[in-house]
Amino acid sequence: MPILPLLQSASNWAPIVFIRDSKYGMPVAESFHLMGLTILLATVVVLDLRLAGLGRNDYEISWLARKLKPWTVGAIVLVMSSGLLIFLGTPGKYLDSRPFRLKMVLLCCAILFHFGVLRRFTAGDSVARPVVNVAVALLSLTLWFGVGWAGRAIAFIP
């Protein structure tokens, strides 16, 4: 079964039509999306800078990771739910967009990297491997900022 007809029927669901067609629906959804992205990137930057040895060295990385995790997870939930509302407004437009497809690939990679690889480096104090820690932090930041940059490119590149 092709996915586009299914998504287009979902885009005709009354709450999605209200968000898409009302004067303030889409701007509110986009505002929540950007707010979630800001919170997410703040937690990622703080944690990655600490992992690289550049920030908040007065806190153990494992303690910092535990304190930031609820904010990170909450921000991901906010970004994903608001992003779904935005996407369902015009699914065909997004599915045809190369930057959107790149954003989705980078998002999956960033989430898997954050909760898979990065989690192992922040579970204990990884002071013994500073070069590896810097490389892991840079890759994490590249993935997350790539998600943001690809999302911004959706408006400008077909």
Image (spheres, rainbow, N blue to C red):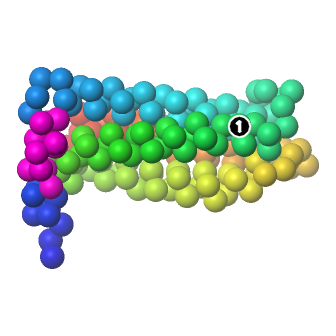
Q: x, y percentage for residue 130?
A: 84, 44
Q: Which residues are magenta?
A: 10-20
Give the amino acid at mark 1.
Lys
Judge from the rendering whether residue 141 lies leftward or rightward of residue 129; answer left or right: left
Q: Nearer the viewer, residue 22 or 83?
A: 22
Q: x, y percentage for residue 58?
A: 86, 27
Instruction: Tally the marks.
Output: 1
Q: Which residue is mark 1?
A: 67
Please tell me which residue is depicted at 64% across the width and 42% down the height of the picture.
69
Please tell me which residue is depicted at 66% across the width and 37% down the height of the picture.
68
**Vertical position of residue 100 compared to residue 58: above or below:** below
Q: Quadrant of the N terminus?
A: bottom left
Q: x, y percentage for residue 106?
A: 45, 51
Kind of element beneath mark 1: helix
Whether residue 87 is in magenta: the answer is no
Please tell me which residue is depicted at 61% across the width and 55% down the height of the picture.
115
